[in-house]
Image (spheres, grey):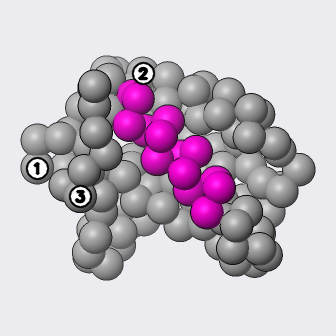
Amino acid sequence: MAKFSRAMRMNSPRDYTRVFRQAKRVSGDGLMILAVENKIGHPRLGLAIAKKHLKLANHRNRLKRIIRESFRQHQSDFASIDVVVLSRADIKQYDSAQIWAALEQHWLTVVAQWQKS
């Protein structure tokens, strides 16, 4: 059983800046996934969920829980990459099941991109 430990999180603003500058992008269904290779040896997740897109804190927190759980279940599929998930303006029209399905598709795309390169 894979855990989502502290080591799996991106903590430093420098890491986020590197991902925003150099990342490969996957977008759709209210989310944008940015991914870039890291030298750490395991995948890490960063979240950028905008208050502008989800006004209520409980909605933002629900989205973050879904993303973290989905990432945890797929972390063994990823190479050594840093992944940042951003919300988009249309995220509020999707329910939890649709977000989960969108993440499943995005993770497949990210894995495929890293196997090509």
Q: Amino acid at mark 1?
A: Ile
Q: Quadrant of residue 41?
A: top left
The residue tagged 1 is: 40
Three-letter code for the amino acid on which mark 2 is drawn: Ala
- Of 61 and 52, the residue lying toward us: 61
Q: Which residues are magenta?
A: 61-74
The residue that label 2 is drawn on is: 112
Which of the two marks, 2 or 1, is nearer to us in this view? 1
Of discs 3 and 2, which sits in the foreground?
3
Res. 82 in view: no
| Mark 1 vs 3, N-terminal side | 3
Compared to 111, does 43 lie above or below? below
Q: Position of residue 38 (x, y in %)?
A: 19, 50
Kindly report the secondary structure that dominates the magenta region of the rendered protein: helix
Q: Residues within 10 Å of mark 1 (few under 14, many from 20)?
A: few
Closer to the chain start, of discs 2 and 1, is: 1
Q: Residue at x 76, y 68 (%)?
A: 54
Per the model, the C-alpha gap separating discs 2 and 1 is 20 Å
- Percent position of residue 2, x then y: 28, 31
Instruction: State which tag comes first along the sequence, 3 or 2.
Output: 3
Task: Name the residue that disc number 3 marks.
Answer: 6
Q: Residue shown at 28%/39% (left/top)? A: 3
Q: Is residue 34 left or right of residue 62?
A: left
